[in-house]
């Protein structure tokens, strides 16, 4: 970890947790009319809209901070750009719960949040400490150092780095590890390769990688700045597009489509998003694989060592959807009819249990976050998964177990709400 | 995972199970499954013990013959594992035994990285080093890497280098010990398994998940039929030894011998004899692709006529998956919940 990352004091973290806890008062407790599936789906779209708006607001701030860094590469501007990146991750990671279930998000998100990446596609890497995806011809293409790249027989002119070109380069050669765009590309351009393995410490890219003239380190500083400029511009325009998809009042966007469809379909998407992120993705891919294989290559925010926050806010997103609440980056609270209200109507015991389990998961992920950000002897996720780290393993396992437990109740909630085969893909299935 | 598969996942999430349970048939099915799986685990124990012996013999007296023997012992043991691989519940869940046997997929080549780390370090590789080194070190893929990887076999550490031999023999021993533990625990698990009616659906779901993984992850993705649309042999099992498709065959045989009898028993108890027969026939259809399809995945993806053979296998497996996961599951009333392969 670098000095740019200022750990929050433990007390502050606990306060944040308690504040977040307050947001879970069911909307129905204050509202006269009971929640319906239609009102819950409509409010889900409100949540998504607010959440993507926040992702856009913070991405714009990141774009401005990186522009300042490129124009004036000082330590202070590099630190400010990193802080802006970290702040941008807070809302974005909460949106990931919208990804599974809503194909429009899933088809789009690869350009924003694909990982793990073979960073040698983008810029220089230290060859003897770089393990890339097997069979990936683009793993060492180094777009910044070249004006044309050849991946798997495909030659591309990369003389002028524009947002559109980077979008075309993403997943070039068909490899998901060829991530040319999105948060993790920006992260790599700000932090650089993390060469510390299981040891404490994030990437340590010198600010002189953006210096003009003789001070430039590692070559191609101007190109590197152009890349960073283009990739942050693309991030903003991508998020702008997604905000519009969830905006109310339009007749031709995704929200209009979702709210016009059978409300059961929307409820199914909500629950499916929660369950898939909770079990297969967060507990499985992002934590269990990394832990059991002691693989820091499977660390989500590997350059910045911000993985604990990515996990924490993923968990928060799941809780948001169930409780129908979202704490915006400006501190205001969005709340409305929720799945929790619906389940409470039919099975109050299940609702109470699931709410409790979501809280337990947040506490477990909160412990991971607090431990990583602790001012004394912090332990980041890549250290937690190191071989023989009993404490780290206990913390990660605690979060995995809590997520597994809540997923069981999410399945029950789906049954409770009568969610059956509804998707067009199930035509012909005799349910 | 593709959106379509995702929706399929939830589609079965909340279907209600049938009202009357043929509890006698259920118990019989569980007895059938328990015994069959016990046989599978026993075979795995025997084969891994032989592999451990063969590795030790080779490292004590490295000859062309002892090398051939350890390579074929590796394949026999891996095939035995593939036959029981569908069992994702019970003792195999303890200490992530399944991942210890086979850490897969490994897109970042963690196996090579871990091997490099252990081999470049001078300290002795003991059983406790293996126990503490994580799942990428502990199983069949690591042994396959040491025995079959081209780069490994031409480098300074290639077998029978003493340090590499230490790694190979200790990983083999680890797998043999784990197999014995698994066999013992499965036996101790018997009463609980047979008495607990929830294990009916758990067992059926295990086969469903195995078929889904077989169709989607072990065939469609490397074939470029899903995912990013590019053919890629490296995401299959056992690509280093060229045995990817032989392991597919082993998984199918395992399902046929250890899973199918209990499943058809249940279907027949529900007067679904026609469906039971169609599933039996479809297993035979799949098997008719072998030994023709028993080729390295790299070869199958490169040459057109071999690719056609692979396509034939894929179509047969898809049909089998659909018969079991859609028709049989519905007939028996099994609900598919979230599983670990949801996500991407």
Image: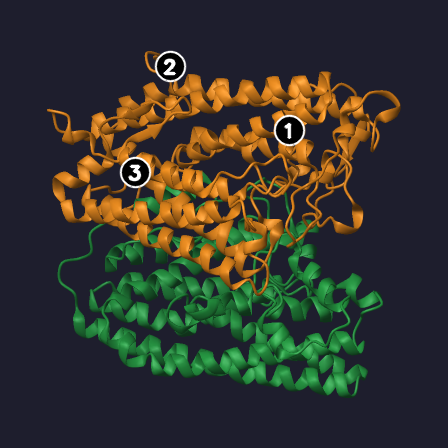
Residue A6 falls in image quadrant: top right
Image position, residue B225 (x, y; %): 55, 44
Task: Give the chain letter at badge 2.
Answer: A
Q: Are marks 1 and 3 in contact (CB under 8 Å)?
A: no
| Numbered mark located on residue B140 in the image | none
Instruction: Inspect this view and state whether residue A382 appears.
Output: yes
Image position, residue B133 (x, y; %): 61, 67
Q: Colour of chain A?
A: orange
Q: Colour of chain B?
A: green
Residue holding disc 1: A79
State the SS at label 2: loop
Compared to residue B254, the image places residue A170 above or below, namely above
Image position, residue B257 (x, y; %): 42, 74
| Numbered mark located on residue A21 in the image | 3
Residue B331 falls in image quadrant: bottom left
Alpha-carbon span between mark 2 and mark 1: 41 Å
| Numbered mark located on residue A252 in the image | 2
Compared to residue A101, the image places residue B199 above or below, namely below
Which of discs 2 and 1 lies nearer the camera? The answer is: 1
Image position, residue B61 (x, y; %): 79, 88
State the SS at label 3: helix
């Amino acid at each position: 970890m670098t000095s740019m990352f200022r750990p929050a004091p433990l007390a502050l973290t606990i306060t944040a947790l308690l504040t977040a806890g307050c947001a879970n008062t069911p909307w129905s407790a204050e509202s006269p009319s009971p929640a319906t599936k239609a009102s819950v789906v409509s409010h889900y779209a409100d949540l998504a809209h607010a959440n993507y708006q926040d992702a856009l607001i913070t991405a714009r701030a990141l774009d401005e901070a990186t522009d300042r860094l490129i124009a004036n590469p000082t330590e202070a501007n590099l630190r400010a750009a990193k802080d802006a990146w970290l702040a941008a991750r807070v809302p974005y990671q909460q949106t990931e719960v919208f990804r599974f279930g809503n194909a429009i998000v899933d088809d789009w998100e690869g350009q924003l949040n694909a990982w793990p990446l073979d960073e040698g596609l983008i810029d220089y890497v230290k060859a003897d400490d770089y393990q890339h995806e097997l069979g990936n011809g683009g793993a060492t293409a180094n777009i910044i150092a070249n004006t044309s790249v050849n991946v798997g027989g495909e030659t591309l002119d990369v003389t002028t780095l524009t947002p559109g070109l980077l979008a075309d380069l993403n997943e070039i050669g068909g490899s998901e590890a060829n991530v040319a765009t999105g948060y993790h590309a920006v992260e790599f351009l700000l932090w650089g390769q993390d060469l510390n393995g299981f040891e404490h410490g994030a990437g340590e890219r010198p600010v002189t990688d953006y210096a003009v003239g003789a001070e430039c380190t590692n070559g191609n500083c101007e190109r590197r700045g152009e890349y960073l400029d283009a990739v942050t511009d693309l991030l903003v325009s991508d998020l702008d597009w997604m905000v519009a998809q969830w905006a109310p009042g339009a007749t031709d966007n995704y929200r209009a489509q979702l709210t016009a469809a059978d409300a059961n379909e929307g409820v199914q998407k909500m629950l499916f998003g929660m369950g898939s992120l909770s079990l297969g993705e967060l507990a499985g891919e992002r934590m269990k694989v990394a832990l059991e294989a002691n693989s820091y290559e499977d660390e989500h925010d590997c350059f910045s060592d911000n993985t604990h926050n990515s996990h924490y806010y993923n968990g928060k997103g799941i809780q948001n959807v169930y409780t129908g609440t979202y704490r915006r980056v400006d501190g205001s609270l969005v709340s409305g009819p929720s799945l929790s209200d619906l389940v409470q109507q039919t099975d109050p015991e299940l609702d109470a249990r699931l709410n409790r389990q979501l809280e337990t998961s947040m506490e477990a992920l909160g412990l991971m976050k607090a431990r990583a950000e602790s001012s004394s002897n912090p332990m980041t996720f890549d250290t937690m998964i190191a071989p023989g780290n009993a404490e780290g393993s206990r913390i990660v396992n605690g979060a995995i177990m809590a997520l597994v437990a809540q997923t069981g109740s999410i399945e029950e909630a789906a049954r409770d709400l009568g969610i059956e085969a509804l998707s067009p893909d199930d035509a012909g299935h005799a349910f | 995972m593709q959106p379509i598969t995702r929706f399929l996942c939830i589609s079965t999430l909340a279907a209600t199970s049938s009202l009357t349970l043929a509890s006698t048939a259920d118990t019989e099915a569980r007895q059938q499954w328990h015994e069959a799986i016990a046989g599978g685990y026993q075979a795995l124990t025997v084969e891994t013990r032989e592999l451990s012996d063969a590795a030790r013999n080779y490292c004590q007296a490295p000859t062309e013959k002892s090398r051939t023997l350890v390579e074929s012992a590796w394949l026999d043991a891996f095939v035995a594992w593939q036959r029981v691989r569908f069992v994702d519940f019970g003792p195999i869940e303890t200490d992530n035994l399944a991942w210890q046997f086979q850490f897969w997929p490994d897109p970042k080549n963690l196996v090579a990285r871990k091997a490099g780390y252990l081999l470049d370090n001078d300290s002795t590789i003991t059983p406790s080093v293996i126990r503490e080194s994580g799942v990428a070190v502990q199983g069949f893929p690591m042994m396959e890497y040491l025995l079959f990887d081209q780069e490994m076999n031409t480098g300074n550490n290639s077998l029978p280098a003493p340090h590499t031999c230490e790694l190979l023999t200790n990983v083999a021993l680890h797998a043999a010990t784990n197999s014995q533990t698994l066999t013992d625990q499965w036996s101790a698990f018997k009463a609980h398994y047979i008495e607990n009616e929830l294990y009916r659906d758990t067992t059926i779901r295990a086969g469903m998940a195995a078929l889904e993984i077989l169709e989607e992850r072990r065939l469609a993705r490397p074939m470029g039929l899903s995912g990013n649309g590019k053919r890629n042999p490296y995401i299959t099992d056992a690509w280093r030894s060229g045995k990817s498709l032989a392991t597919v065959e082993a998984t199918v045989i395992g399902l046929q011998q250890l899973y199918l009898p209990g499943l058809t028993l249940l279907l027949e108890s529900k007067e679904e004899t026609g469906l039971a027969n169609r599933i039996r026939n479809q297993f035979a259809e799949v098997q008719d692709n072998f030994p023709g399809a028993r080729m390295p995945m790299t070869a199958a993806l490169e040459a057109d006529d071999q690719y056609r053979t692979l396509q034939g296998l894929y179509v047969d497996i898809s049909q089998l998956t659909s018969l079991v996961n859609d028709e049989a599951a519905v007939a028996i009333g099994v609900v598919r919940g979230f599983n670990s392969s949801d996500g991407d």
